[in-house]
Image (cartoon, coloured by chain):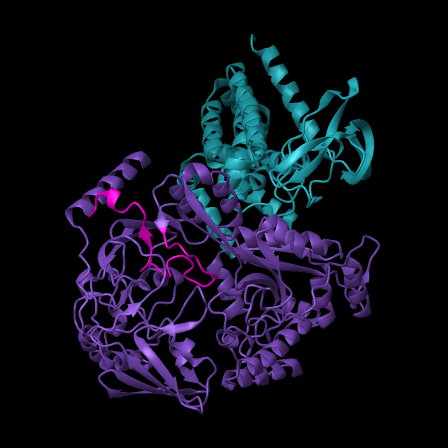
Chain colours: A purple, B cyan
Amino acid sequence: MKVATRLALVVCLCAATLLASAPAPQPVNQGEELARVDGATGRYGGHLVVGQRSEPKTLNPVTATDAVSREVFERLHADLIGINRGTQKAEPALAKLWKISPDGCIFTLKLRKGIRFSDGHPFDADDVVFSFTVYLDEAVSSPQRDLLIIDGKPLSITKLDQYTVRFSLPHPYAAAERLFDSFAILPRHILEKPYREGKFVQVWALNTPPNEVVGLGPFRVKQYWPGQRIVLERNPYYWKADRENHRLPYLDEIVFMFVGSEDAQVMRFEAGETDLINRLSSENYALLSKEQSRSRSQLADLGPSLEYNFLVFNQNDLSGKKLDDIARKQVWFQDLKFRQAVSAAVDRDSIVNLVYGLRGTALWGNVGPGNKMWVNQSIPHPQRSLETARQLLKSASFTWNAAGDLLDRTGQVVEFSIATSSSNAQRMKMATLLQDDLSHLGMHVHIVPLDFRAIVDRVFQSFDYEAAIMALGGGDADPNPEMNVWLSNGSTHLWRMNETQPATAWEREIDQLMNQQMVTLDYHKRKKLYDRVQQIIAEQLPFIFLATPNILAGAKAEIGNFQPALLDHYTLWNADQIYLRNAESAGIR
Amino acid sequence: MRSKPRIRLLIVLLIGMHLVILLAGFFAPYDSKEQNRNLPFAPPMRLHFTGTSGFHLRPFVYGVVSDSEGFRDDSAQQYPVRFFVRGSSYSLGLFKSDLHLFGVDSPARIMLLGSDAFGRDELSSLLFGGQISLAAGLVATLFTLAMAAVIGTVSGFYGGWIDESLMGVSELFLSLPWLYFLLGIRAFLPLHVSPVGTFLLLIGVIGAIGWARPARLVRGVVLSARTKNHVLAARGFGGSDLYLLRRHILPETFGVLLTQAALLVPLYVGAEATLSFFGLGVSEPVPSWGNMLAALQHYSVLVSYGWLLAPAAALVVTSVIYRMLADALQPARY
């Protein structure tokens, strides 16, 4: 059965590539202001097969909320200013240059002239104005809308001429150019009608005819097979060219094959059915590196990621909820010494060793060593010490009974549960290690494996949990995307959600510092403010930080310009430059 | 009659196996929860009799060192295996002990079946895990058979609408997709249930679901028994229902129940393993054969650390012995 399906798939793919080859890149015109890219000059042709864990839900970049959809449609669209995933710096995209007014409130962007959407329609300032009108429209309720609201006020956009737009911010906003990354510019000629008719939310579903999904990205949709794969083909009008003035992208096609799980991704890759794996676990990385020479693949270990795994205790206000048992335990969770004791007892080295196979880094704060621009180097990295942990508990009036169980001041045994996503093997392992670590302090910890959605619901909505292991971060290196975690009224202020005002003095201080860094334009001053935030977080431990995995990726050896980066999308961010070294031998062109 | 020695042999084997598992604390060299974080996924150790200093009557193991390639034996360190050593304490019902059948002097560790992701001794986990798995099988079987005997007897003996409604319910239970049913039940459980609580729940659910088939068999036997002449005669002499059941009818169901028991135990041990494999059974750090096998859900583990399949071997052996016993019991019934 399996062999038959695979065979059929291969035959289909071969037939598909032979029968309908991708459109040839359009010749470069004089009037076109193309972007030139550095990097090795590649060869045209071939298709890249990528295994996806699951199917995208939509191709609509405005309404999508899931990462999988994003991985696909980001190849179809382009933004005004992009963050180069390799250098982590903002760089010109559809805007060839931008100017910032001295007060930092006005951004004037010059757009590239003469470039076209994937259907050949020319692009200009009207498309930009239309796009941001849609993103800001409350009726569309884009998840990215929040980013454009600064201090409660939306930014405003005006068209100055056909190729110039001006963005006005209500007040200065640090690194505002980074804001534009991932705001896909939409084709007004296609989407204005459905938008006016109030049908914007329905546009660009997966079953939309491919020629109606139009963008400025390196690829456009060719075909979608539900449950199997989505095939993207070259956008012949793409606005980037290589050093020799060849229009990008090099690849004829990218095929996203929906395979189900990371293990399935690895097996398909080993079998040679896929060409690239975006993110590998350390176990699978070790497995693939054992046979690297045989399977002719290139593996990359990029060092610590920007994501942080942590244990969070439920400190939410539970009044009005029937969760008395949890409310009773919150006396411990809200005790700083209790959290410090837990942190001191955690064996982070073992997490790095046993969970990440040494391909990870222990964490004591929210910014890890992978974020070189923003990490506060002065945050202490205390060694694990059960003795310190016991002292802390003792000073917080905890005691031990004859059997070694930890008792609180009312004589109750300290017993709580850690919820974690059952589908995430790494976090399950962390939970098992924590359970053992904390048992040495006499704490009784139960591990509750739950469906990921059930955890999100409990942590964000019902507050029916005691402690949970979760992960955050990884989007951008800049502190601004972290605002929603650390501001007391932030939407991801996990340990105490929906605060109307800061519950503690230190939360109030973080609020001030975070708001201040947002309007400070000087990097060094911002860094100083954010350093202080990191220091407070490390001292007050709203999260017990555990570790961060390395970013691990792999591709077949014949893939050129494979330059995985620390920021998402790790491997396909430069899909326009990726090429196959043996493209011509594949017989496509 | 021919199969009697065979039955005897199988029963002796089963008793032996259950005794070893019951006395897991004594036979296992370590506590199954004890993590040894320097030795994750250590391969099974070999017992040696000959070393640099010639032949030893007392077997020994080499110390283990790890390098970038993994683990290897360090022949410079020899640790003789000692018998009846003191180690981690365990409880056997009412009394506690710390005597183990075998062990080696620390810092060395003897891990005859290797170790898991946390460096826990696989052999110890296998023995302690067997306690959960086998106990779940045995207790759930008892529970099922008790239910089956009562329902089947009532149904067969009284007949009429009682019979029809009970058998209707049994059909419903037979058609239940029990794995999905259990997944559903798990979602309604409170946030954390202690391992003991989960264990009892597991047994309750497994046992409660399986009663339908044996109950129908018991009903059949009761149905034919109640019309037999000696039963009719006893009834004619004024025997009460209770007397008839106790004296004449229930003894006839004994053979069916015994065979069913031999069939159900391995089935339920397997069911426990399935549930724990999917994370519905007892949770860390308490081992069971099912949750030990759950580690193999990951492709990298499955292809790299074959010794973690030991619980699967234990499951196969258990089921084969029980099945053979059920087969052997079958002709002996009549």
In the image, taking residue A399 as reference, residue A450 lies left or right, namely: left
Q: Which residue is drawn at 46% across and 33% down?
A: B213
Of B9 and A360, the residue lying toward us: A360
Residue A70 can be seen in this image: yes
- Residue lying furthest front: A244
Q: Residue at x 60, y 83 (%)?
A: A502
Q: Nearer the viewer, residue B83 or B327?
A: B83
- Residue B180: x and y, percent? 44, 46
> Residue A192 sits in which quadrant?
bottom left
Q: How many marks?
A: 0
List the single residue furthest toward the top: B2
Q: In this view, does A444 lie to the left or right of A452?
A: right
- Is residue A233 magenta-colored? no
Majority secondary structure of magenta residues: loop
Q: Can residue B244 be seen in this snapshot?
A: no
Horizontal and vertical percent position of residue A470? 55, 62
- Give the quarter of the image for residue A123: bottom left
Q: Quadrant of residue A527?
A: bottom right
Q: Where is residue A86 in the image (x, y as percent from the top left)?
A: 44, 63
Examine the rendered structure and indicate whether residue A27 appears above or below residue B153.
Answer: below
| Residue at (40% x, 62% y) in the render | A67
Q: Give the range drawn in magenta.
A: A560-589
Quarter that holds the N terminus of chain A: top left
In the rendered image, residue A572 lying in the magenta stretch gets the answer yes
Residue drawn at (33%, 58%) of the image: A575
Question: Residue B93, how many percent across, how many down?
Answer: 76, 38
